[in-house]
């Protein structure tokens, strides 16, 4: 019993240290498909775009995601050109343009929840610049279209995954699905993973929200 308690205490301590110091094994760039995100609840989106947009850049350990780490500096409101660049890459769809630019609710939340967990490598500016650079490196909509996966069509998990792996050096993405209509799984987000230096791809841990058995097809909403 005593030995078990020591082991449990060490596991808890290790987890706590990860949260404080922000050590991580890889980064997951999460890209949202707006047609799916904005479908429900009705009127959730004040603005949208006809391409993937950034949800976040998430530092992860093998087996779990780092969130709300201590350390680093508080989020500082962006101004000028950085705001315009972020608007193009990381649209705050739930908020009108003026409110979004002034208060930056999505960007500040994502930085507090995820960005501060990699502050030892990336300060606030570097974190957001990196996310935008990684998105620019990938044109997932064009990649999917090249493989016959166009908005409004349905495909198996394997077909979608195979198409994406053509641009990730055969590393697994994380396909994230939702079920707005009962019995219909639809592609909501795609996670692409990178090593901590973000100079090579890394296999993503699957969230298992899609049907990976290929017994049904996944909707890519128009």
Image: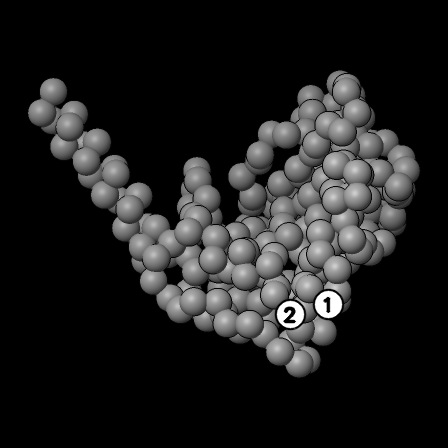
Left or right of 7? Residue 166 is right
Measured along the vertical axis of the image, is residue 79 above or below residue 122?
below
In the drawing, does residue 151 fall left or right of residue 43? right
Which corner quadrant of the image does residue 102 belong to? bottom right
Question: Residue drawn 48% across and 54% down?
Answer: 114
Could you tell me residue 170's position as x and y percent? 65, 46
Q: Position of residue 44 (x, y in %)?
A: 74, 44
Tell me the colour scheme of the image: one colour
Above-or-below relation of 50 to 125: above
Q: What percent of the width, then of the height, locates residue 131?
A: 61, 63
| Mark 1: secondary structure | helix
Q: CA distance from mark 1 to mark 2?
A: 6 Å
Asked whether disc 1 touches disc 2, contact meaning CB atoms under 8 Å apart, the reply is: yes
- Residue most extreme to the left: 2
Residue depicted at x 75% and y 36%:
41
Locate the N terminus by quadrant.
top left
Q: Which residue is mark 2?
A: 102
Residue 144 against residue 57 in the figure, above or below: above
Q: 21 or 212, which is in the foreground?
A: 21
Residue for badge 1: 98
Q: Please tell me whether residue 44 is drawn above or below residue 158 in the rendered image.
A: below
């Amino acid at each position: 019993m005593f030995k078990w308690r020591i082991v449990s205490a060490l596991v808890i301590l290790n987890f706590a240290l990860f949260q404080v110091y922000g050590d991580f094994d890889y980064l997951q760039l999460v890209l949202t498909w707006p047609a799916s995100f904005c479908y429900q609840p009705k009127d959730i989106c004040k603005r949208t775009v006809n391409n993937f947009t950034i949800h976040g850049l998430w530092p992860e350990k093998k087996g779990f995601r780092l969130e709300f780490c201590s350390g680093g500096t508080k989020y500082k409101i962006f101004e000028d050109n950085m705001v315009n660049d972020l608007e193009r890459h990381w649209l705050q769809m739930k908020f009108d343009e003026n409110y979004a630019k002034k208060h930056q609710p999505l960007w500040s939340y994502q930085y507090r929840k995820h960005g501060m967990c990699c502050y030892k490598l990336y300060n606030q500016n570097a974190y957001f610049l990196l996310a935008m650079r990684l998105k620019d490196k990938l044109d997932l909509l064009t990649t999917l279209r090249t493989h016959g996966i166009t908005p409004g069509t349905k495909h198996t998990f394997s077909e979608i995954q195979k198409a994406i792996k053509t641009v990730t050096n055969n590393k697994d993405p994380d396909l994230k699905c939702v079920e707005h209509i009962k019995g219909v799984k639809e592609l909501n987000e795609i996670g692409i993973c990178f090593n901590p230096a973000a100079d090579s791809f890394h296999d993503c841990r699957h969230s298992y929200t899609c049907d990976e058995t290929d017994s049904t097809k996944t909707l890519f909403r128009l």
